[in-house]
Image (spheres, coloured by chain):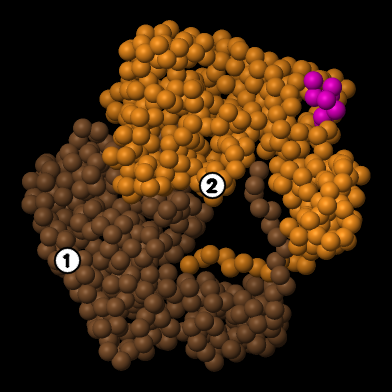
Chain colours: A orange, B brown
Amino acid sequence: MKSNPPRLEPKADKDTVRRHNLSLVLRAVHDDGEATRAGVAARVGLTRAAVSSLVEQLLDSGFLTESGKTFSGQAGRPGTVLKVARTGVAGLGVEINIDYVSVCVVDLSGTDRVRLTEHLDNRAAAAQPAEVLARAAGIASRALLSAEEHELRPVGVQLALPGLVSGGTVRQAPNLGWTRVAAEGVFAQALTAARPGRRPLPVSADNEANLAALAELWFGGAGRERTFLYLSGEIGVGGALVLNGELLRGAHGFAGEIGHVVVDPQGPECHCGSRGCLEQYAGQRALLRAAGIDENAGLPGVAELERRARADDERAVAAIRDAGAMLGLVLSGAVNLFDPDAVVLGGIYRTLMRWLSPTAGREMDRRVVSGLWPESGGRLRASSLTGDAARGAAALVVREVLADPVAYV
Amino acid sequence: MKSNPPRLEPKADKDTVRRHNLSLVLRAVHDDGEATRAGVAARVGLTRAAVSSLVEQLLDSGFLTESGKTFSGQAGRPGTVLKVARTGVAGLGVEINIDYVSVCVVDLSGTDRVRLTEHLDNRAAAAQPAEVLARAAGIASRALLSAEEHELRPVGVQLALPGLVSGGTVRQAPNLGWTRVAAEGVFAQALTAARPGRRPLPVSADNEANLAALAELWFGGAGRERTFLYLSGEIGVGGALVLNGELLRGAHGFAGEIGHVVVDPQGPECHCGSRGCLEQYAGQRALLRAAGIDENAGLPGVAELERRARADDERAVAAIRDAGAMLGLVLSGAVNLFDPDAVVLGGIYRTLMRWLSPTAGREMDRRVVSGLWPESGGRLRASSLTGDAARGAAALVVREVLADPVAYV
């Protein structure tokens, strides 16, 4: 039984405590949207005087703004309203997917302020990984110019990539055709080269479904689930597990790869090297092909699929329903393993939900062993409109600022 | 973004701090097996004087014993060796499975001190749930008499049940044929009735695979994985996920049900109401049937299967290999989702490992998308001999004592 009992923490010095409390106050204002000094004091459990001093420092450093007058609801002086700043420190998210790059700048409140999306073919057959990363860095540098116009200053870059990412390197991204690409380093160098004379920005990389799931967690609306399975339907089928409001990354950072759960061991070959993976039945290409649409038509092809389904085109509807049944089959296993509150379908699944969910739901209803699906507990729903991997990526940078604002002054 | 920022904790009073520190010292001795006061002081970061005072209280209350003399390795007085007591406070675990009940008493060190196993048919067709629980309570009361002989005093009972357990109730145990059985309450009442004049013991219930996984975590040997997927092969196929040394329970407590992941959507009906579940291909009955042995032969049947496989009986070997391939197929999906360091096979799989693992490993090698299986990271291994659900259950009771010994004086 080696469980390393907790050790007593060394006594925190005054600076550390103040730094921690600055974060506490900033996060309180951030989470509530707007707040008074008295409201913050009540929420974080510090004295009004201590909060006032911390607020002054956050105002001076540009993390907070104050405006107007309000009554605190208690006897005494009216307080001004505090909000997190809409200018200054910001986050930059860069999603590199198979057929597009989407760049997003969010401010300290997490709001999407600049968005630049370009459609292009990023597969290794069309462009080498270094070229793809350099093009994405070019797009990012243009978004950074727009950010400047809005007086926003991104302090870090988070890449979102459709593959297994660990230690800054893409271990494998089957649909891009990438193996062992040092994405963080290559992108950072390209971004620095694209912005001569500017300070280099720190770059991190993660899996796109992980970041889309975080966006769903943070921006999916009030009262949403804290434990859910997220599926990102694109050319690949990505996934992520969120457990009690935290990403479950697994032992090596590769958890969530639901697209490569096997539906039929003798099924069609998959880019990952296996056979009969879910992606081969419910990925974008399989869906388009089954509906009689060019499988390489990309997002316009998905729009065409949706149009046909709306027009009750039998083949289109059957293609989506069949994919839904395959999703339901695999999801029932995933729910039996992970027992989430909800399964959230994002990417192209969001728009196809109306036809996917009856067949997927039927499979889950029959096969989820707890009987909790769907009537008395779990639910299958579309992702919210407001979150995607690029926004989740940018917001992750902002989260780091909120955790220790002093480091970003 | 409603993430409830941490509030400052109210100042702990002196009693709370001492209570916490008593647990800290007791766990330090427990985790190290034996320790000196100086060793404990270094480990927990308290002064030697404070540790001495805490140790005196733990000796007086019977949680620790001291013996012999040792040199601390440093200059100064020799210290005596502290160990956790081998008498006194203990834990009682009761595993109720399909065809046996196993009861275990462990002492404060987690050592298995009393074991009583009875083979009987616990299915609803043979006996009502209340009868099964009453019989198990009878077995438990006999084990408690043995515990008394050893001067052990169990302070709580943990039930291990082959089904979905939540809030003290078995929601569903397909192989027992139980639905909504208030196991905790019924067992507690039966145990009290079986021990007239004795103080009633608190009873908790959990899933048997969860408790077997905890036994593997705690007693599986030094340096074992902290993140693993555990499979318990019995008449049912149970499972549990351990993430960073903690059970992953999911949103409703039902995580880990790998036996009901679908292998073939059109496959044979399963007791759970679905079709083609893993249990129908790799459960004990399916294995025996495929080998040409009576599927209801129970553990003697499994012994016969192993004997035949050792004698190179083709049908027996093929049956195990086929089950291994099905296990590998489902495990590759589970590994893609959860990314563990290892997959641990317990129950009947432990003894069949030699024939299971080549086919299971081959599937996983081909289908785990990270490529981490098996050569460079993850591994498939048999559970250790030393852990099972009953011992995990009993040890869980002891863990609660270690967390707050004062509550058990």
**Residue identified by numbered label 2:** A226
Host chain of mark 2: A
Q: Is residue A152 magenta?
A: yes
Q: Quadrant of residue A197?
A: top right
Which x, y percent locates residue B145?
Answer: 28, 86
Which x, y percent locates residue A1?
Answer: 48, 67
Host chain of mark 1: B
Q: Which residues are magenta?
A: A146-153
Q: Residues within 10 Å of mark 1 (few under 14, many from 20)?
A: some
Q: Which mark is residue B128?
A: 1
CA gap, disc 1 and disc 2? 38 Å
Q: Nearer the viewer, residue A236 or B185?
A: B185
Q: Is residue A220 left or right of residue B177?
A: right
Q: Is residue B139 left or right of residue A75?
A: left
Q: Quadrant of the N terminus of chain B?
A: top right
Q: Can you say whether B31 is above or below B60 in the image?
A: above
Circles 1 and 2: CB atoms closer than 8 Å: no
Q: Can you say whether A126 is above or below B44 in the image?
A: above
Q: Nearer the viewer, residue B362 or B190?
A: B190
Which x, y percent locates residue B141?
Answer: 26, 82
Which x, y percent locates residue A33?
Answer: 73, 43
Residue at point 81% right, 20% down?
A145
Q: Secondary structure at mark 1?
A: loop
